[in-house]
Image: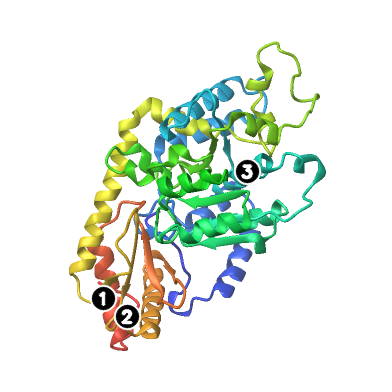
Amino acid sequence: MNQAIQLQNPPEYSLLQDKVTLLKKIDNCQTMNDFQKLFREHCINTSNPYFLNQLYGNVDQTALQVEHLISNYNTNVYTYEVAPVFTLIEKETVKYLLKKIGFDVEKSDGIFTQGGSISNLYGMLLARHQHNRKIKQDGISQKLYCLISEASHYSIKKNANILGIGEDNVIEFKAHQNNYDLERLLKEFKPFVVCLVAGSTVLGDFDNLDTIITLCHQYHTWVHVDASFGGCALFSSEHKNLLGGIEMADSVSWNFHKVLSLPIPCSVFLTRHKDVLRSTTYKEARYLFRETDEIEPLDLDIGQKTLFCGRKADATKLYVLLKVHGESYLENKIDSLFKLRDRLVREIEIRKRFYLICQPTYLNVCFVYTDDISDIEKTSQTVLSIRQRLLEENIMIGVHQIGAGPHFFRVPVINQFDVDFLLDAIDRFGFNISNNVSAHTFS
């Protein structure tokens, strides 16, 4: 599996045509060998060094072994009775992560979830419950407002729909400007929650957690921090300052399947309000959860704290990784990615026709290739054309656009790749495109 992607007849490639062809091949599979061949030839190989399209990539081999073991035991982590080992492992992992955030372990709690969007849902639900505990039984009888950083993940608005808040009642503010605008919004709307971001999806931005959380707490407002992407900087002594102030947050989302390359999913929701988590999500189910004080059932039956009954033992992947390799293993991984990011940035800065969109804060490097940075339309056309050529060479890079600005490349430094090879390919295709020369391949 040496390719990031597999395209049929690249020059005539059509997504619709490929879908039809692929569906026929799927339908024709009859044996395990057929399916293995199908997966090998047509699945995206995210462990390829040049899969640079998403905030995840290669898979850690130790964690992959754990994933196989978890699937083999095929249990559900909702009661201690059916998952004693996995239950205790999750509780110990949560305690470790609470300490890492800076929460008081005795007063805090958390659970592993199916992903960052679900963790964000938990944060908003707990905030709503803390704001008005009658809603759990009576439903929403008045408008509620949510303030979000302009760089927030789209799941916040989707969750507003799920919670009955309404997407129109989610109000954005500019977190990187002074706090006058935010304070005005806090006074005017009296939001039940303010959602901040630590490591935004596109630029990798971090909100000023310390200052904003302090201000929000002056207005008795719950603050949820989406650190799904950026949280892993806490494993690095050199870079953990990016999350300064996160210990004051009321709740936090954190993914380990992104930067740390654990098998998807491996995500956690943490809160420094242990009582609020249980009171928000608890629902009696005597057929499943024990109601005696025999062995602290309310503490050991984790399913009573979850929104969704069925859960895999995802915490085990992180727990075993830490036990087998130690925390220094994770710190070295994070630091090595930052060094690779810096090498990529230095090369972009010294090469002609390469321009950074912004200086990276985290692991996302955003840039364009263009003859004229002032010509937004031409720059966008060049970037989009280069991406298509890269796809034909099995190099997958995401392209994004912010507002009316040009389209640009976003390289999340998750996989280890050769910086010169990548930029040379972009330069070759970009030069030929600028000179209207066809370049489907390069030597």
Crowding at dot 3, Cα within 10 Å, few <14 / some 14-19 / many 20+, comes out as many
- Is the residue under label 1 in contact with that under label 2 (CB below 8 Å)? yes
Q: Is residue 13 above or below residue 166?
A: below
Q: Is residue 366 above or below residue 65?
A: below
Residue found farthest to the left: 350
Left or right: where 357 falls relative to 292: left
**Coordinates of residue 74 in the picture (x, y in percent):** 63, 31
Q: Which residue is mark 3?
A: 127
Q: Quadrant of residue 393?
A: bottom left
Q: Which residue is mark 1?
A: 428
- Report the number of numbered marks: 3
Q: Which residue is mark 2?
A: 439
Secondary structure, mark 1, is helix
> Looking at this view, is 103 or 86 the one in front?
103
* Image point (28%, 88%), residue name: 435
* Image point (41%, 61%), residue name: 177
Secondary structure, mark 3, is helix
Q: Is residue 137 above or below residue 275?
A: below
Identified by mark 1, the residue type is Arg
**Coordinates of residue 402 in the picture (x, y in percent):** 45, 71
- Is the residue under label 1 in contact with that under label 3 (CB below 8 Å)? no
